[in-house]
Image: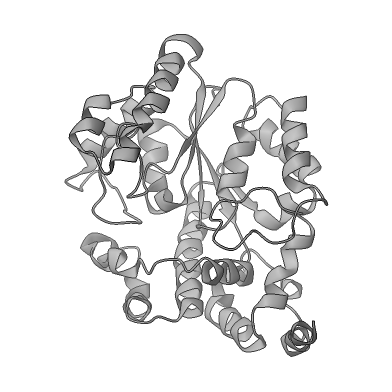
Amino acid sequence: MSDGRPILVTGSIRSGTTWVGQTLATAPGVALIHEPFNQDHPIGVFAHRWSTQYTQVTDVRDEARDVARAMGDMLAHRYRPLVHLRNPDNPLRTLGILRDLPRFLYRRHVSSPRIVVKDPIALLSAEWLAARFDMDVVIMVRHPGAFAWSYQRIAEPNRFADLNRQQELMAGPLAPFAGEVECAANTDDPIYQAAILWRIVYSTVTSYQDRHPDWEVVRHEDLATDPLMEFPDLFARLHLSYTDRTNRFIALSTSELNPVEAPIGKLHHTRLNSRRSLDVWQRRLSSEDIVRVRHLTEDVADRFYTTSSWPSSPGAIASETMRS
């Protein structure tokens, strides 16, 4: 394994990919790029505009050549200001050239850092990316109950129509989920949407595990419970140098002085009391929603979590929350 290989940090949304990506980027000679597969990404950084969210890229897709060119440029630190100027999504974003162009020029001609691509939206394309660009892959897993609470809390947009529009995807890997995707696309029930999205993502991950035992599959809960023990091991497996800077970042981002919950409306909040935040979902979700999430995800969740990870008496937890 070469120390220069790019690293893809993926998984589900709301699974800790931002926190892990930022932590890995504290290693010497590492730079972080945020979600090039997001439809709202800076197009000068990654010169391709997506028509769907959660796109699965394979070599047989018409856009694969364009995506490969954009990814190759990004990983080689080639910024595309003219593409950005030809596609001004809004005037304020155009000002991003003043930030991104000098950064990419420095990386290309001076520092040549190893790239960490933090992108949960690229999960369905992880195999293509890993094979095409010789990437190390880190997949974050988060408990389905915690995921459902976070999904509901931030009012995540319904993206299931984007899955349905990808005929090759729905006729292939997601064929077993066709009915559930259709139902999720036509409901405004965030708990159902969250549970089905979790099942799709982590069913895909289980197949990845079977085919790629060298990929790092990491539970958010393990990192949050003992970050100063777990992160050094992850750094070692990725051939990254673990330094005092990383240690300080982890201490600050997981401190007991941090809030237990992220502020409402804060999408990427990486400073939390990591240990105490783990069971917030058990107090915030209703007992009925906990039972629903478990029922909808249990066949896949059993691959990652034991029965003891679920509250033994969700009704009692809900009553305690109501009293508080």
* In this rendering, position of residue 194 left or right of residue 122: right
Chosen colour scheme:
one colour
Where residue 22 sits: x, y (%)? 60, 38
Which residue is rendered at x = 79% and y = 57% of the image? Answer: 275
Q: Quadrant of residue 235?
A: top right
* In this rendering, position of residue 106 left or right of residue 292: left
**Number of numbered discs:** 0
Q: Looking at the picture, does residue 98 appear above or below residue 89?
A: above
Which residue is rendered at x = 45% and y = 75% of the image? Answer: 193
Where residue 179 sits: x, y (%)? 33, 80
Which residue is rendered at x = 45% and y = 81% of the image? Answer: 189
Which residue is rendered at x = 37% and y = 49% of the image? Answer: 38
Where residue 28 sits: x, y (%)? 63, 21
Q: Quadrant of residue 133?
A: top left
Most extreme residue toward the top, as rendered?
Answer: 110
Q: Looking at the picture, does residue 268 appear above or below residue 232?
A: below
* In this rendering, position of residue 85 left or right of residue 157: left
Pick the residue in front: 137 or 113: 113
Pick the residue in front: 259 or 225: 259
Pick the residue in front: 116 or 300: 116
Whether residue 243 appears in this view of the structure is no
Quadrant the C terminus occupies: bottom right
Where residue 262 sits: x, y (%)? 65, 58
Most extreme residue toward the right, as rendered?
Answer: 256
Quadrant the N terminus occupies: top right
Whether residue 166 appears in this view of the structure is yes
Q: Looking at the picture, does residue 15 appear above or below residue 235?
A: below
Q: Quadrant of residue 273?
A: bottom right
